[in-house]
Every structure is written in structure tokens, then in C-alpha cells.
Image: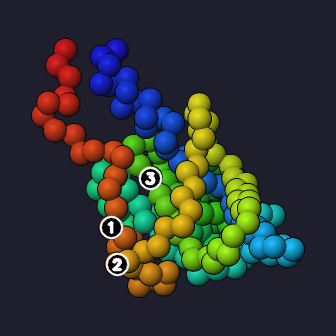
Amino acid sequence: MPTKTRLITTVSAILIVAVLAIVGITTKAQASQTNAQVVILNLLNGQQYFGMPHVYQGDNGGTPTNKWPVYYGPNNASQYWLQGHINSDQPVLELVPGLGSGGAMFWSENYSGGSITITIQATASIVWVGTPFQVYLFLKPTMWGISPQYNYTIPYKSIYPSPVASDVISP
């Protein structure tokens, strides 16, 4: 396998966030003597708790998309589960549908020093070597905010470059 193709495949495999079926995201910040725990999103065991306002951004091979992430609540979760021949109304946040794509969820939090613990519990349809989640802290948006009007409009630089003629491998 050519080096460039192997590198692209390896980076894609390591950095991809697989289909997220059941999510629980919690942050815990310690400031001096107090512990404050904030639940951002909890879809575990049939719950559909959104503890913080958040926004989504999707990427499809280097091109922004609004097709994911997508939230399936109890009223339409069966659409997601039927793809796997499963009868369920368990809420789902599907971050991405497969390889070469990405999905992000952003929320606002305050930090006043000390340690931070972020806990993510999820089910992935594909398991790769490496971590399927990336967590970026202390991102302060300058051209967008945490409100529904910014869903799928967040400027970003994709790790998945759009293919060009020189990337095509001839037989």
C-alpha cells in the first residue's frame, strides 16, 4: 500500500468518531474545595436530558454538512435502530455515519482552575485502534456562539482534505 494512502487510512481510522448510539457526557471541575458536576447530555437508559445548550457541526470528507450530528428522540429513534434490525425507542445522538466524516458537539462551560474530568460513555458501531473521541478544552468562539442559530455553521479546518487529481492512485 502506498505511503500516502496508508497515512490517510491510518489518520482516518484513528481520528474518526464512529456512530454514537448511546451518549452520556459529563464534566467535573474542581475549584479549590468544591466539586461541581455538570451533566451536558444524558441519553443513557432511555433518558433524554440536555443539561447545557449545545451546537453541532458535521464534516463529510472535508466539506461541511448539516446531515449529522443528528439527534433521534423517543418519537423517531426507531428510524435509527431499524437499520440494525433492532426494535427500540432508545434516544440516540448519531455523530457520524461512517469513515471519512466527522461530527462535533460544542457547549459552553466556565473554568476557574483546578482539575477537569470529562466522562464520555458511548457505543460505537466500529472500533478502531486509538481513541474515537477528541476533546478540545478552552476553545473560545469568536465568530459563533452556543445557540441553535449556529448549528451547522461553525467555521473549521477539516482533517479530511477534499481529493485532488494527484491523490488518485492509478492501477
Is 142 placed left or right of 46 in the picture? Answer: left
1 vs 3, front mark: 1
Q: Position of residue 17 (x, y in %)?
A: 53, 48
Residue placed under numbered mark 1 in the picture: 155
How crowded pointer 3 is (Cα within 10 Å; few <14, some 14-19, many 20+) is rated as many
Depth check: give the residue in front, 31 or 43: 31
Do the residues bearing badges 2 and 3 touch, measured as CB atoms within 8 Å? no
Q: Distance between the residues labelled 2 and 3?
A: 21 Å
Q: Distance between the residues labelled 1 and 3?
A: 14 Å
Is 4 placed left or right of 34 in the picture? Answer: left
Say what amino acid the circle numbered 2 marks: Met
Give the mark nearest the N terminus, 2 or 3: 3
Given the current orientation, which residue lies at the most extreme left position?
165
Q: Residue at x 56, y 62 (%)?
A: 137
| Secondary structure of the residue carrying numbered label 1 | loop
Q: Residue at x 36, y 46 (%)?
A: 159
Residue 120, located in which quarter of the rendered image?
bottom right
Give the mark nearest the N terminus, 2 or 1: 2
Residue placed under numbered mark 2 in the picture: 143
Residue placed under numbered mark 3 in the picture: 102
Depth check: give the residue in front, 70 or 169: 169
Say what amino acid the circle numbered 3 marks: Gly
Res 59 label: none
Do the residues bearing badges 2 and 1 touch, measured as CB atoms within 8 Å? yes
How crowded pointer 2 is (Cα within 10 Å; few <14, some 14-19, many 20+) is rated as few
**Number of marks in picture:** 3
Is 63 placed left or right of 53 in the picture? Answer: left
Residue 124 seen: yes
Depth check: give the residue in front, 158 or 34: 34
Q: Position of residue 60 (x, y in %)?
A: 35, 52
Quadrant location of the C terminus in the rendered image? top left
Q: Position of residue 91 (x, y in %)?
A: 68, 67
